[in-house]
Amino acid sequence: MDYKETIEFLYAQLPVFSRDGASAFKKDLGNTLALCAALGNPHTKFKSIHIAGTNGKGSSSHMLAAVFQESGYKTGLYTSPHLYDFRERIRVNGALCTKEFVVNFVERVRPHLDRIRPSFFEITVVMAFCYFEQQKVDIAVIETGLGGRLDSTNVIIPELSLITNIGFDHMQFLGNTLPEIAGEKAGIIKEGRPVVISEYLPETKPVFENVAKKRHAPLYLARDLWELSVGVPTIPIDNEQAPLLTICTHRKKNGSEISPVHPMALGEIYQLDLVGSYQLKNIFGVLESIHQMRQLGWNIEKEAIRKGLKRVKALTGIVGRWDQLSTDPWIITDVGHNVDGIRMIRNQLSKMKFAKLHIITGFVKDKDVSASLKEMPKNAQYYFTQAPIPRALAAVELKVLAQKYELAGNDYANMKEALYAAKANYSNGDLILVCGSVFLVAEVKESMRQLNIIA
């Protein structure tokens, strides 16, 4: 098989969560462990950082990877899902894994498929492990897919675990309360290994404290350890250069620290090219994770942190986080799709200047769509559409549901039609925002190409 045939084989032969939903979710680690065992246990052959959370885990993963790259470490990065190319899931120093590797890996694993019957996600996780082993990475940053405790990535023993935040998402798998969801995410905490919590709520803090204590894992609540001041930029319409988020940080001294003041505690100024104001929640956990990795002996200089955070996009290839795709018309995409994600988007919009807001959106039907719609801005013209996957909520159903929350707009069969309508209604000074399902956002660039909108 060539590369195209190999990818088609994976999608055709294996349960895929993005397409099949709950039927593709495996409730134990048995398949992943069996597949790893059949391939020589690649997950034990490299050092790693493990990241879970409802929102922010992808951005945090890319930030950490960028800093390690700038520090001179050969850095693996596993994230999911992908937007445009399957190989976005597996990178080393920002470069996509090779097509040749994907083809060879699938040929290598095919004899085990009938016996183990893995899902698409389980295959991609083990593929990443094998690639990182083959590439002899110094460190791999591994993002969980869904949850933590039962996530296929949770077979690694990381140097450090990071949990970004806890919100309502995937409740059918993780629980209906925040403590229940936190308990699933806390499943990535490992015996004796430090764990950093980017942010917590009164009802989730005891969960993290109890699991960390049980597993003798040093616990660091990043929000309590860092002070931060920031200037959030206004993004001008005609600005061809991506703005930078300027952050001044200071690590507080706490009672458990008896060593001399850490250099980073003197107050540092960083610039971040992930400009969504919601990144301020993630930066606490990222900085504390870097601090703890330094304590473990990793050589990460302040200048590497500065350069890494300033060039996350260029170093890691991250997409879908407040991406400006065009200035005329002004188009921004963001993969925020749950309650917290939509709130973060709304907060970012409140800091921006535009004439009229056009929002193209769509969701998958197994999410709590009503809760997300309730958080969407009302002062916008909506274009309700759907991604070309079975899980997508029909655009006409979405429009009817949105009307209950005073969101006005029309429904469109696909992204191309929605974008065409938004462009037709667009005037100079307006903003077109595409948000919601990752699979919807993935359609934007191709639709722009078909409509001759220059990215």
Image (cartoon, rainbow, N blue to C red):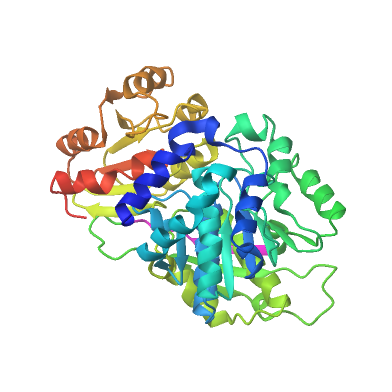
Q: In screen coordinates, is 102 left or right of 290?
A: left
Query: Which quadrant of the rendered structure holds the C terminus?
Result: bottom left
Q: In screen coordinates, is 13 left or right of 210?
A: left
Query: Which residue sits furthest front?
Result: 111
Q: Is residue 353 above or below residue 195?
A: above
Q: Is residue 151 above or below residue 249?
A: above
- The spot of residue 165 in percent (x, y) is 63, 48
- The spot of residue 329 in percent (x, y) is 20, 48
Q: Residue at x 41, y 33 (%)?
A: 377
Q: Is residue 423 above or below residue 274?
A: above
As for residue 152 lying within the magenta part, the answer is no
Which image quadrant is residue 19 in?
top left
- The spot of residue 396 in percent (x, y) is 32, 20
Q: 166 or 69: which is nearer to us?
A: 69
* Number of numbered discs on residues: 0
Query: Which quadrant of the rendered structure holds the N terminus?
Result: bottom left
Query: What is the magenta segment's predominant secondary structure?
Result: strand
Asked whether residue 280 is in view, the answer is: no
Q: Residue at x 44, y 67 (%)?
A: 312
Q: Which residues are magenta?
A: 226-235
Q: In screen coordinates, is 386 left or right of 175?
A: left
Q: Residue at x 85, y 69 (%)?
A: 256
Q: 27 or 393: which is nearer to us?
A: 27
Query: Which residue sits furthest left?
Result: 452
Asked whether residue 236 is in view, the answer is: yes
Q: 64 or 358: which is nearer to us?
A: 64
As for residue 234 lying within the magenta part, the answer is yes
- The spot of residue 421 in percent (x, y) is 19, 33
